[in-house]
Image (tube, helix red, strand yellow):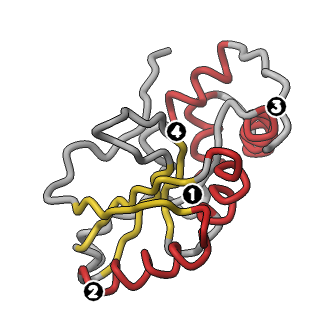
Amino acid sequence: MPEPKIPAELDATDRRLIVATQSGLPRVSRPYAALGEQLGLGADDVLRRLQRMLDCGVIRRIGAVPNHYAIGYTANGMSVWNVDDSRIDELGEKVGALEFVTHCYRRPRRLPEWPYNLFAMVHSQNRAEVAARVAEIEVLLGKACLAHDILYSTAILKKTGLRITA
């Protein structure tokens, strides 16, 4: 399990930077300079603040968020797993590290109807490819996997994270 991070103290400028970037970076050749100009900062200060917030866990990552449907990945399957609780942290880390898993997290079971405690999202161009990837996960989990299923998406309902206001 990762070590807990030290909480960061955010000032008003940090909050304005979060608000300015929560819908994405500006689509220009120098996005950090553009943010700095918007916020009255230098590009180096923008980068330093973002790095501090990454290091402290205030933000998890800076990266592209593709629309899977737009790039041809129309078979989106949430694989759900009933994994031995004594191994879920160890195995969840391994599943989450797979290049074809975009989201991986632990959730509580809701017995007797819902025995699954590990969720891993797999995107592909068709359901056969998703099933093949899920079979790879099943091999990785081995005997710690007691059951699994795949829930396929039929529509995108939300494609944004948490939003804050200044």
Find numbered disc 4 in the image and state the secondary structure of the residue it sits on: helix
Give the residue at x 33% y 36%.
Answer: 112
Please, what is the three-letter code of the amino acid marked with disc 2? Answer: Ala
Element carrying mark 3: loop
The residue under label 4 is 21
Which marked residue is nearer to the observer: mark 2 or mark 3? 2
Instruction: Specify which label sits upstream in the sequence, 2 or 1.
Output: 1
Mark seen at residue 63? 1
Question: Which structural element holds mark 1?
Answer: loop
Residue at image position (50%, 50%) is 118
Quarter holding residue 57: top right
Mark 4 near mark 1, Cβ–Cβ under 8 Å?
A: no
Give the mark nearer the N terminus: 2 vs 3.
3
Q: Is residue 104 above or below residue 114?
A: below
**On residue 128, which mark appears?**
2
Task: Select label 1 or label 3 by which is in front.
Answer: 3
Report the residue marked by disc 3: 4
Position of 109 with respect to 74 (left or right) is right
Q: Is residue 18 left or right of residue 113?
A: right
